[in-house]
Amino acid sequence: MAQGSGGKLTTHVLDTATGKPAAGLEIWLYRVSGNSHKKIKAVTTNTDGRCDEPLLAGKDFKTGQYELVFLAGDYLRAQGSALPDPLFLDQVPIRFGMAEETHYHVPLLISPYGYSTYRGS
């Protein structure tokens, strides 16, 4: 696995039901190797739906397989809308690979009944 200082990983979360950033949404970052998951960071989005700093950068950035787990259910419940129990979406995992030392941006667009993601810039 390559290691260096040229890459970084960022994310942000937008609430498509309200058209606003998803502030206060907890995110867990795991490094994945085969069937093994190692939790390496837990962060919470700020008022802009972003993290205050990159999830990985500099010497902490390594290529490989990762998984972001967005604790969407906790965020959605906190919005005060009437939601079913159990929620349709609770934890939203996104597994992805980083093959180069470059900027990887993995955003989440979330609502109570759907989500999408893409490799952003």
Image (spheres, helix red, strand yellow):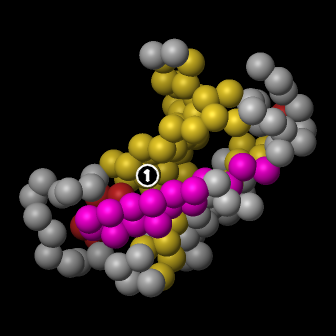
Q: Nearer the viewer, residue 86 or 102?
A: 102
Residue 36 picture location, percent across and down: 48, 17
Residue 78 picture location, percent across and down: 29, 70
Q: Nearer the viewer, residue 79 or 33?
A: 33
Q: Is residue 6 above or below residue 32?
A: below
Residue at image coords 55%, 52%: 43
Q: Describe residue 71's horizontal placement relative to residue 105 as left or right.
A: left
Q: Residue furthest right?
A: 5
Numbered range of the magenta stretch? 103-118
Q: Residue furthest left?
A: 85
Residue 44 picture location, percent across and down: 52, 58
Residue at image coords 38%, 49%: 92
Q: Main secondary structure of the magenta part?
A: strand
Q: Secondary structure at mark 1?
A: strand
Residue at image coords 67%, 60%: 120
Q: Is residue 88 above or below residue 24?
A: above
Q: Quadrant of residue 53?
A: bottom right
Q: Nearer the viewer, residue 47 or 105?
A: 105
Residue type highlighted by circle 1: Phe
Q: Is residue 6 above or below residue 13?
A: above
Q: Nearer the viewer, residue 104 or 5?
A: 104
